[in-house]
């Protein structure tokens, strides 16, 4: 019974003329608007939305002009502005510039033409740079930029500009210059820093040394960048000195984690002195040692090193690592020397009483390595490196792109215990100096 009734209702609806249904339900204004954009509807909903949006933008600009000049053909005494026709210009839409006609407003006293806020918002060139930055850092090349644009209808596509390879490249240079300036000018005085990590990344046989800090709540922040041929002492010292000038406070102690390069260690001691507690990456140490060994000897040496580094007693772990170096002295002396170089600093984090997940996090440079990995990925489409400035721009853009996906370090809930140990270390370092000054004054 219910089925018969439903079928009868469907037949009644089908018998109604569609044109009559449209006439009876849609206002005249809506029907006229649909007639004007009927050709766009066939190209999809996005093309329809763009056409409608441009029409709305035109109405908004006209409404803003009306607010300044009054209604059309109305002569209000004492008015400050009059209508001045329209002028061709463009607005930013989906990573391109689309031509429109902007209403003009003239000042009655002959002064400068006022800006329409609606137009200024829609025509912002910064939006073009942001879109270009996001797409190119995501791997879209300048040649394929046009293909990445949304299909906004053939009419808009034919008149749009700023999609050429050179235009996109110029906007990307502008965006990366801005990113580099932002990174190098960051104010660090408001950060409570507990950990500093320093590492190098190679771009076409040239090195960028980068720095990242971890605050007391476990937040990662990229802070520094320097370009050079190698990770030399002068380069790293200049970068660390710049961090101090920008407000990096290490008076309460600072854990510095490095990859093991001697130049990095020397620069850290030069800039931060005894207030810095140095730790070296265990992963880099294992790789360096293995580089001095034949393949058949690497497995057991790697296992012995891991057992030494992971021993719960840092003193016993250090003794075990030295014993391993002694066993390698005669057969592989270079590997033995690699083990002994900076060996005590392999146990720094454990000596600070750090345990659990945070210990695993800080015993390597993995937190900064993940940032470097993203920076490398963003440059996958670069085929020709022109100069050092280009390397700096790409590196800075990649670092800030990585920051968008940062989370707090694993084990961040254990950071207060580390901070307490760093404060105790700083007090022990500065106390003898304070006592000596008091005795001199007396």
Image (tube, rainbow, N blue to C red):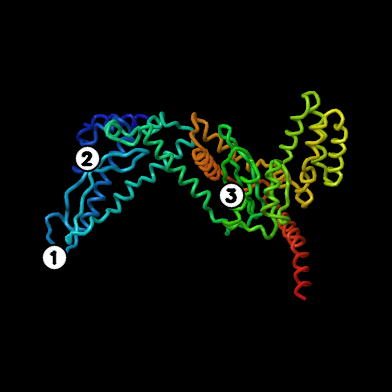
Residue toward you, 364 or 24 = 364
For label 1, the crowd category at 10 Å Cα-Cα, with few meaning under 14, some 14 to 19 and many 20 or more, is: few
Residue 226 placement, left or right of 51: right
Q: Earlier in the sequence, mark 2 or mark 3?
A: 2
Residue at image point 26% right, 50% down: 60
Assess disc 2: are there few (<14), some (14-19) or many (≥20) residues with their C-alpha within 10 Å of its C-alpha.
Answer: few
* 281 relative to 418, above or below: above
Residue bearing the label numbered 2: 33
Q: Residue furthest bottom?
A: 442
- Which sits in the foreground, 53 or 381? 381
Query: Residue beneath label 1, please?
Result: 77
Nearest to the eye among marks 1 and 2: give it: 1
Query: Which mark sits nearer the N-terminus, 1 or 3?
Result: 1
- Measure the alpha-carbon separation of dots 1 and 3: 59 Å
Check disc 3 and report the residue beneath it: 221
Residue 157 is labelled as none
Location of residue 188 by image quarter:
bottom right
Tell me what residue is drawn at x 27 percent, y 34 percent: 159
Q: CA distance from mark 2 to mark 3?
A: 52 Å
Picture coordinates of residue 394, whole percent (x, y): 51, 39
């Amino acid at each position: 019974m219910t089925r018969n009734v439903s079928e009868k209702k469907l037949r009644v609806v089908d018998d109604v003329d569609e044109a009559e249904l449209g006439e009876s339900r849609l206002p005249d204004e809506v029907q006229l608007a649909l007639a004007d954009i009927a050709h766009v509807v066939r190209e999809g909903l996005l093309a329809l939305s763009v056409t409608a949006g441009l029409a709305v933008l035109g109405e908004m600009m006209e409404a803003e002009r009306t607010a300044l000049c009054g209604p059309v053909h109305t002569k209000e005494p004492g008015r400050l502005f009059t209508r001045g026709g329209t002028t061709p210009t463009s607005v930013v839409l989906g990573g391109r510039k689309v031509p429109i006609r902007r209403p003009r407003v003239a000042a009655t006293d002959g002064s400068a033409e006022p800006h329409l806020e609606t137009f200024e918002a829609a025509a912002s060139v910064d939006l073009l740079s942001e879109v270009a930055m996001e797409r190119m850092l995501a791997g879209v090349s300048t040649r394929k930029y046009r293909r990445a644009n949304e299909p906004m209808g053939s009419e808009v596509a034919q008149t749009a500009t700023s999609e050429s390879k050179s235009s996109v490249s110029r906007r990307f240079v502008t965006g990366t210059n801005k990113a580099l300036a932002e990174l190098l000018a960051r104010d660090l005085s408001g950060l409570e820093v507990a950990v500093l990590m320093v590492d190098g990344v190679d771009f076409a046989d040239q090195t960028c040394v980068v720095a990242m800090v971890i605050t007391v709540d476990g937040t990662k922040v990229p802070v520094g960048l320097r370009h050079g041929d190698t990770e030399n002492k002068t380069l790293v010292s200049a970068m660390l000195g710049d961090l101090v000038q920008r407000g990096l406070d290490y008076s309460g102690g600072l854990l510095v984690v490095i990859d093991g390069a001697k130049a990095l260690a020397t620069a850290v001691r030069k800039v931060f002195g005894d207030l810095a507690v140095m730790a070296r990456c265990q992963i880099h140490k294992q790789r360096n040692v293995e580089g001095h060994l034949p393949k058949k000897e690497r497995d057991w040496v790697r296992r012995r090193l891991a057992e030494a580094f992971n021993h719960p007693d840092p003193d016993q772990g250090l003794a075990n690592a030295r014993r391993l170096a002694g066993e390698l002295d005669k057969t592989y002396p270079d590997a033995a020397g690699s083990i002994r170089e900076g060996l005590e600093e392999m146990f720094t984090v454990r000596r600070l009483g750090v345990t659990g997940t945070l210990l695993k996090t800080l015993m390597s440079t993995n937190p900064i390595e993940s940032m470097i990995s993203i920076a490398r990925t963003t440059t996958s489409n670069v085929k020709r490196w022109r100069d050092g400035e280009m390397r700096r721009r790409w590196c800075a853009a990649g670092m800030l792109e990585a920051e968008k996906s940062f989370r707090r370090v694993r084990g961040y809930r254990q950071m207060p215990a580390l901070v307490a140990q760093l404060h105790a270390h700083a007090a022990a370092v500065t106390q003898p100096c304070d006592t000596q000054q008091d005795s001199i004054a007396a």
